[in-house]
Image (spheres, rainbow, N blue to C red):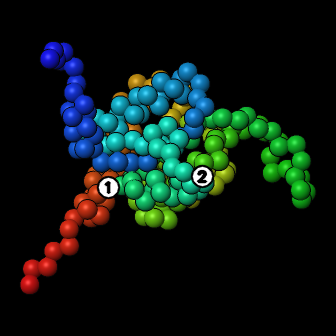
Amino acid sequence: MSVVKDAPSAIQTCVDRAFRIPIFLSTTNTVNDVQGQFLNRLVLEIEDALLFPRTLPVSEQYPENILTNIRRLVFSSYGLLAINFRRFYVEILRSNVGDPPTTTPFWEGSTFSQIEPAMAFQFGIPILLVRETGTDVSNGIWAGGITPLNIFVDWDSDNQSVDEFFNSVQWREVFANWTAEVRGNYLLRTEPMFNNQ
């Protein structure tokens, strides 16, 4: 039997994952090249923190409907990191009541970038929200004042490289705080009940 040196074994791959805490990475499946670079770097950051990113439908898929799949992934995760990328450049032409709120075109992200963090918040797991600047600025949880500032960070993709963002003090501070909250949540949810009587 020959063994290839330096090749990871199946058991080692399994063990490597076993020591990572699962988190829900909420993102869109359609990204441009720069967003893809950002997402790849984000996954590396998550893995370097010994967390295991899971997402629908890439790493997880269950036979139920989409909302049930999201709920199942939220319940089996110890934190949620949502990235809201620019997807659609929208201009409001008409409103059902009166004048449109704005006639200036704006960026919208994925519908699921509203649903998944809201479900995670309801369940009480630590949340970190990362938004490509200008996306959903007046929409849902991504609008100003809805979420605490310590869980929200913007990536200015027009003026900031991927490396500049991930090397910024703002990112490192917010990510370190969120990672600590995820570890605390993991400890609380997995610690066995102990009775000292």
Closer to the observer: label 2 or label 1? 2
The crowding category of the residue bearing disc 1, from other C-alpha atoms within 10 Å (few below 14, some 14 to 19, many at least 20), is some
> Disc 2 or 1, which lies upstream in sequence?
2
* Residue at image location 65% in from the left, 47% down from the top: 111
Q: Alpha carbon of mark 2 to alpha carbon of mark 1: how far?
A: 27 Å
Is residue 133 at least partly visible in the picture?
no
Are the residues tagged 2 and 1 within 8 Å (C-beta)?
Answer: no
Residue 134 in the image: state x and y as whole percent.
63, 38
Residue in the foreground of this view, choosing between 19 and 120: 19
- Quadrant of image for the C terminus: bottom left
Position of residue 111 in the picture relative to residue 70 (left or right): right
Task: Give the labeled residue for mark 1.
Answer: 181
Depth order, front residue of 123/83: 123
- Point out the residue furthest to the bottom here: 197
* Secondary structure state at the residue bearing disc 1: helix
Residue at the image point whose x is 42% and y is 43% from the top: 54
- Which residue is depicted at the point 41% across and 33% down? 42
Residue sticking out furthest to the front: 1
Which image quarter: residue 43? top left
Answer with left or right where residue 113 lies relative to residue 59. Answer: right
Corner quadrant of residue 3: top left
Of residues 136 and 25, the one nearer the viewer is 25
Circle 2 residue: 66
